[in-house]
Image (cartoon, helix red, strand yellow):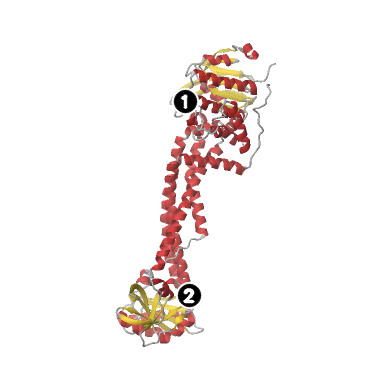
Amino acid sequence: MKKRTKFSSPTSKRSFMGEMKEYFQIAVRNLRTRSLRSWLTILGIVIGVFLIISLLSLSEGIKATITQQLKALGGEMIFVMSGDLSNPMSLFIGGAKLEKVNIDAIKKTRGVDKVLTMSYSSSVMRYKEESKTVLLCGQPWEEGLELLQRFQGWSLAEGRWPVPGRREIAVGQQVANEIFKEKIRINTESVIKGKRFEIVGILNSLGSKTEDSFIYLDTPLYQELTGEKRGTAQMAMVKIEEGASLERVAGDLRINLQETRKRRAGTDIADFSVITSNTMGDIAGNILAVIQFAIVAFASIAILVGGIGITNTMFTSVRERTREIGIMKAIGAKNSAIITIFLMEAGIIGLIGGAGGTILGAGMAKLIESYGQVHPVFYFSASITPGLIIFSLVFSFLVGCLAGFFPAHRAAKLKPVEALRRYE
Amino acid sequence: MIQAPIIKLEDVWKVYQLGKVELAAIRGISLEVAPGAFFTIMGPSGSGKSTLLNMIGALDSPTKGKIFLKGKDISKLTENQLSQLRGKTIGFVFQEFNILPNLTALENVMLPMIFQGKSESERKKRAKELLISVGLEDRIFHLPAELSAGERQRVAIARAFANDPELVIADEPTGNLDSVTGKKIMEILTDFHQKAGKTIVVVTHDPNIANYSEEIVNIKDGQIVVNHKPNFHLWKQR
C-alpha cells in the first residue's frame, strides 16, 4: 500500500444533538432557498393558530369573568327570573317580567328571609355635555341596601348612599372613571331621559366590569324613568333564612311560582327560572363549553388545511430536490438523515406558523379586550395563558411534522441511482 | 506482490424490467481491481458502463452475482448499510458535477463529513485543505453558480475525497468539460491517486484518459470485450 499522509483524517463521533443541529441548519437553509413558498406555507398555519388563540383566549376570558361574577354573588342566594333558562337567550334578553303576584309568592315561600327585586335596562346619560349609553339598575334602597352591603359586598368609595324619595343616584367605578371623558365627581348633576339626577355616591368596584358599569337607583325612580309597571321586576334575589337548605327553598320557590302562573293563565308551562349560584355556574359553563368546542372544531379545520398546505409544499420539494436527495445519499446520507431533514423543514414551518399565529391571535384578543373596556355593555377580557401558548406551539409543530411525514418518507425511499438519473 | 483485490465482481448481472421486456444491461461480468489501481472502464454509450460503475460504487445492487468490496460481499446489503459504506469508503465524481447549488464550495466539501459525524471545526479544516489542494483557495466561499464548470468539478473532486475514502469512482468526469479543463481535472485525479494512494475507477469514452490508466476494460452490450494493461510500466516510472 502506498503511504497515506496529507489526506487521512481521524474520525470523531459527535453527540446525537450535534447531528440534529447539523440537520437543522441544512433544513433552515433549504427553507430559505425557497423563501416565498416557505412563507406562504407558513401563512396557512398562521391563520389557523391565529383563530385558535384569539377565539380561545377570549372565550377563556369570558369564562373567567363569569366565574368571578358568580363568586361575587355569594353562595347563599337564589335568583328568580321570568323566562326559561333552558333557552339560553332569555338570560341575555330578559324581556319577560316577574309580576306582583309572583313576587308575593316568592316572599311567602317557606325559608325565604328577604327578597330583593331588581330591574335593569340601558339608557343614554348626559354628563357635562357628553352623552353615553349606560346601564340602569333599579333596586329598592330601603329594604335592599343592608342586604347588598352584607352579602354582595357593596361599599362606597366616595359620598353617601342615595336617600329614597330624592332624585339621587349612585354610580359604579367604571361609570365614574372610564365611560365619560371627564371623571364623575359626587354632588354633580346628570341627565337621564330628560330628567335631572344628583350623583351622591360612587361605589367601590364590585368585582366585575359589567357590575361597575351600572347606575344604581331606587325602584320608584327607575320605574318612573323606564315606565315599568309598579310592583313588577325583571328578577328577584332571594336571601334564605339561616339554617334553611338552599336546594329545598329553590324547589319550593319553583312549585309556588308555577302555582301562581297556573292560576292566572291556566297553563302549566314552567317559564320561571329559579337558580342558585351553583346552577348558574353550570349553565354558563355548559354554554361556554359548547362555544369553545365549536371554536376548536373550526380552528382545527383551518389548521388541517394549513397542514395539507405543508404536505403539498413538501411533496413539491421532494420532486424538485430528487437529484439533491440522490447526491446526499450517494455521499453517505442514511435514510434517517433524509427523513430528519425533511421532517425538520415541515416542523419548522409548523412552528413558525404557530408562533406567528400566537402573536397575531394574542394581539387581536388584546385589541378586542381594549375595545370591550371602553364600551360598557360588552365586556371581554382576553385570557392568554402560558398553557394556551405552549399548546398552540406544540400543536402546530406536530401538525407540521405529521404533514411532512409522508413526503419525508418518500424522499428517503428514493434509490440513489434513480434519483441521480432523474432530470438528466 | 499480489494483493487481495479491493473490488471483485463475480458473474454480475443487472437486468431491468421494462414492462414485459427484460433488458440485461450487464451480462455476467467478472473483474478485479487491485488496491491503489487507476482503473478505467471504456465503452460506447449504452454499453452498460455506468450501470457497472454504479454497482462498483455501491449505488446499486446487482440482480445476480456477487460484488466484494475489500473481501466483503456487498451485493445483498440494505439501503442504509450501502449508504454507510459509501459514506465511509467511497467517493464519487459525476459527469454533471452534482454539487448542491445552494451550498458554497466549502459547505459542499464539508457535507459528506456531516454524515460521518465529524465535528464542525474538523470538517472546515479538512474541506479547506482539500479545496486548496485542488487549487480553489480563492473560491472557498463561492456558490456553484459563481464557479466555472472546471471549478465545479474540482469542488466535486475535493468532496469525493472528504471522508478519506479508499475508493473513488468517477463517471465521465471530463464529459462536460473542454479538453484543456478536462486534462487539468485528470491531472488532479491522478495526483490524488499517486499522493494519497487511492483506488480510482473511471468510466469514460475519452481515449486520452486511457493514458492515465493502469488497467482498462472495454465493455460492449454489457460484457467485457477487452481487458488490458496499456501503460502499466509507464505508470510505475511516472
Quickly name the residue at label 2.
A72
Q: Is label 2 in contact with label 1 (beta carbons under 8 Å)?
A: no
State whether residue A120 is above or below residue B21. below
State whether residue B39 is above or below residue A265. above
As drawn, is A13 to the left or to the right of A392? right
Horizontal and vertical percent position of residue A148:
45, 81
Horizontal and vertical percent position of residue B165:
62, 28
- The answer to whether tags 2 and 1 share a subunit is no
In the image, what residue occupies the spot 57% across and 24% down?
B169
Numbered label attached to residue B17 = 1
Residue B76 in view in this figure: no
Which image quadrant: the N terminus of chain B?
top right
Numbered label attached to residue A145 = none
- Disc 1 is placed on an element classified as strand
State the residue in front, A88 or A227. Answer: A227
In the image, what residue occupies the spot 52% across and 35% down?
B103
Q: Quadrant of residue A360?
A: bottom left
